[in-house]
Image: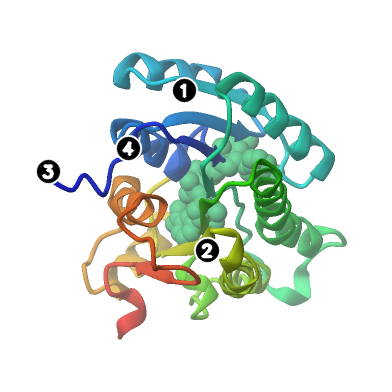
Amino acid sequence: MKHDIFSLKGKVALVTGGNRGIGKVVAEYMADAGADIAIMDLDDASAVAAAIAAEYGVRATARVCDVTRREDVRAAMASIAGELGTLDILFNNAGIVMHKPALELEPGEWEKVLGVNLNGVFYVAAEFASRLVSEGKGGSIVNTASMSGSIVNIPQQQASYNTSKAAVIHLTKSLAVEWADKGIRVNCISPGYIATELISFVSPELLETWRGMIPFKRLGRPEELAGAVIYLASGASPYTSGCDIVIDGCFTVV
Ligand code: NDP
């Protein structure tokens, strides 16, 4: 390519929830595009980081970190920046789901979903942006929202998840405007149903119902999100901020 606008060479990308699922696969594709990778996850993602480093010839590291604990987020980021030199890109992706009618939620369940999916996303974004500002540099944030932030899924009931993801979309737009003059772009992706461990608890009958509702007649694959994340993270999208890319096999179109 004459204009290598999708290259992430020389950039350090932080991926939350990168021990498995979408985060792991997108981290691999970002490494393939040249980025050094840092993973923050509840679980130890050292093996994933080592495999990425070996496969793509980049630097990769991992920290155990609960994104709902802001002090831990700050410390993990400082430790990563100490090892890899700096941070440039954030794929702010860790999240959880709960299928449960609103009237049956136990105490703390609403708070748990909002705690990870909204507070966690904000804490990581804010600590990341704060680091960039203190280093006097710009960067790019890609949050993982969901089509559930724009529509209400059926037949399962999941008000906590839908609400958290709607909030992520508006948080994305709000931070994009707030940080525009700091050179920090903030965008999000809204995946449809993607085949990962996140939905491994779903019954074969419900999966079949979903397939019937998706115009593509299949679930998406994590790698089908990588192009959008790399586009938003890279120099291919310098004038794009506050944008939500929906990747859902046409689910929300009909
Ligand atoms: P997975 O459950 O496969 O992976 C999520 C990862 O995030 C896991 O490694 C998990 O760790 C980690 N994680 C969970 N909570 C925390 C936390 N508090 N701090 C740090 N890490 C945490 O999910 P997906 O890859 O499918 O989902 C990734 C993102 O994509 C989520 O935000 C999800 O809401 C979103 N999404 C997923 C869709 C899908 O159909 N799969 C559709 C639309 C959006 P552990 O294994 O210990 O739980």
How many residues crowd around disc 3 within 10 Å: few (fewer than 14), some, or many (20 or more)?
few
Residue 121, percent from left and from top: 66, 55
Q: Does the closest atom of ligand 1 sit within 8 Å of the Cβ of label 2?
A: yes
Mark closer to the observer (3, 4): 3
Report which residue position mark 1 lands on: 48
Mark closer to the observer (1, 3): 3
Q: Earlier in the sequence, mark 4 or mark 2?
A: 4
Q: Earlier in the sequence, mark 2 or mark 3?
A: 3
Report which residue position mark 2 lands on: 145
- Mark 2 lies on a secondary structure that is loop
- Mark 4 lies on a secondary structure that is helix
Rendered residue at 53%/62% (across/down): 186
Disc assigned to residue 29: 4
Residue 122, percent from left and from top: 70, 58
Mark closer to the observer (2, 3): 3
Q: Earlier in the sequence, mark 3 or mark 4?
A: 3
Residue 152 in view (yes/no): yes
